[in-house]
Image (tube, rainbow, N blue to C red):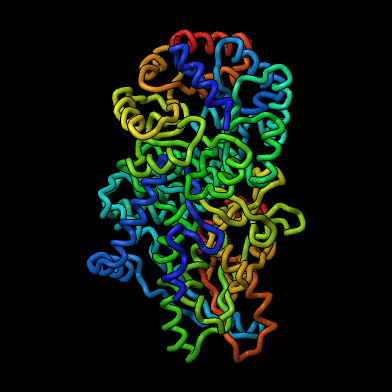
Amino acid sequence: MTSKIKDTFSEIKAENRKALITYIVSGDPDLETTLEIMHTMVEEGADIIELGIPFSDPMAEGISIQKGHERALKTGASLIDALQLVNQFRSSNKKTPIVFMGYMNTFESLGAQAFMAKAVSAGVDGILIVDMPPEESSNFSDHAIKNNIDIIRLIAPTTSLDRAKKISSQSSGYIYYISVKGITGASNIDADDVKNKVEVLQTFTDLPIAIGFGIKDAISASSVKDIADGIVAGSVFVDLIGEGNDVLNMVAKKTKELKEVLG
Amino acid sequence: MSEEIMPDKNGRFGVYGGRYVAETLVPALEELAEQYEFIKKDKNFLKEFRDDLSHYVGRPSPLYFAKRWTELLGGAKIFLKREDLNHTGAHKINNTVGQILLAKHMGKKRIIAETGAGQHGVATATVAARHGLECLVYMGEEDIKRQSLNVFRMKLLGAEVVGVSSGTRTLKDAMNEAMRDWVTNVDDTYYIIGSVAGPHPYPQIVRDFNAVVGEEVIEQSQIQIGKDPDVLIACVGGGSNAMGLFYPFIENKNVRLIGVEAGGLGLSTGKHAAPLNDGKEGILHGMRTYLMQDDAGQIIETHSVSAGLDYPGVGPEHAWLKDIGRAEYVAADDEEALEAFKELTKVEGIMPALETAHGIAYVKKIAPTMPKEQTIIVNVSGRGDKDINTVASIEGIEL
């Protein structure tokens, strides 16, 4: 089966560069702005957009993204809104893959089957449910596979080799390697450690590997860019949105800065 | 025995429970489950745990016949299981005494915990002090206001209390923050969860360490009553004191098990903390269980006069016991709890915690409907000193 995510990584590889994956929260600070930010990010070089689905209890997020979730929830943003947002985005962009990143309870409130059907019709390409390890995911996985939606999974510094193999075999699209033990926006990224771990992953999976948590600028991006197939930057964008000064320009600048490092 | 069946190897009680956490924590939880399975069969550990329960906690706790209260209500005989007499004043210490030994066995140097009313925070700070381990307790800022006495106790015990200002600033947010700390410091830190909630194996560990309550009741009923009790009653927030009392009785179907949730301003108002009465299935804090949530799957703000019950979820084993019909779950509202708090204090000279008072309130309802030959045992899960400020301020009295 074709996958937009897979095609995107193939193109990037052919161009001998690394993928820039950007994360923002759907509805932060409002849905209209989110849509504008998505287009801006793509214009400045984002290859894939991870759209955070606001949740009242985002347990794996650091303070920056927690605040993004809170801002979005204040406007009443929901999973349904995010689906409509993608629908709108697709009216002018059919190419850039969109991944929904969120917490299981919001997805369960729609139900796996109903969600996947809506995701396909809206134009969502993948899901990354943070609190859904493989052991708890059979229902979502089955429906995702049926609907050709990629399941992106997390591998952490604490994940054992055997477990990493199991997770890889049940993933598609790309693997999201968490660069640090911690929450999003952590600051203690250790490039050597990441390199060692990612090299091992590459011995048993052909899936692209993206590195996330703690990448916020050109320096941190360049420290890990040669190790993997792409990087994910989130907290830094959500902070800019939170500051609320000239958001589109600031997001454009930051996207460009990261893009230049990645080639 | 249900002990062998529940939870199953995936940490499930029926469809409930499980391990819904970010990948970073999965290996830590697997290791915890493995170490727990080992230690719970280890003779040295069991001896140390039992010795601590006897000599540090002061167990067994008495089963007390509430004669005047029984006469007042005019129905079934009422016995109080006096967990309020434990060291630190609540059942919470049973669990922390056990988990700190597990933490030491695993070589962890730093202890973290979440707390609502502060009883679990105090119980954790207490055992950390005793074992000389660093201790940090997360507590919602709303609860810090409501429970200033316990905050000061924790500080005296050498713990650091960190206020949590995210979300609803109560127990659920404290738990989110403790999880974030754990995921960041997973190598050297042990997270002592205070209820039968959270990802597997916590619901099992906390239940097992509290099961001493029910085990003692089995023996005490035979000696003091000469037969099994007819009804067991306990308040349910996360549900650890109730699970501790109920668990050894699950197979004994002659005994009715009744959990009392926090009805807040009344079930019909939606402002309560009674997910088993008026919630629906979902996923929070690593477990599948009944939750207070809206149609979009957002966890909604709960309300209860008692900080310890002010939680939108409930332990997965309770969700399962409800579904299979083995236990019944009812609710008592704020007003009923306050009335029960005052009544037990005046009639028996025993001041219960506001959490406990919810169980007491249901005894007031059910005892008069039962014949005098029957017996109710209610778990007095904690003492009420910590709640004096709350009760006074509701009455408009400044202390």
Image quarter of residue B253: bottom right
Q: Is residue A184 above or below residue B262?
A: above
**Does residue B165 appear in this view?**
no
* Residue B98 rendering spot, x and y as whole percentages: 34, 61
> Which sits in the foreground, B95 or A187?
A187
> Which sits in the foreground, B295 or B386?
B295
* Residue A96 rendering spot, x and y as whole percentages: 61, 20
**Does residue A253 appear in this view?**
yes
Image quarter of residue B219: bottom left
Q: Which residue is found at the position 50% from the left and 90% from the top?
A: B227
Q: Which residue is found at the position 48% from the left and 72% from the top?
A: B247
* Residue B319 rendering spot, x and y as whole percentages: 58, 62
Q: Residue furthest front?
A: A1
- Relative placement, left or right, of A213 versus A240 is left
* Residue A206 rendering spot, x and y as whole percentages: 41, 30
Q: How many marks?
A: 0
Q: Quadrant of the N terminus of chain B?
A: bottom left
Image quarter of residue B372: bottom right
Q: Residue furthest right?
A: B268
Q: Is residue A62 above or below residue B299?
A: above
Q: Is residue A70 above or below residue B360?
A: above
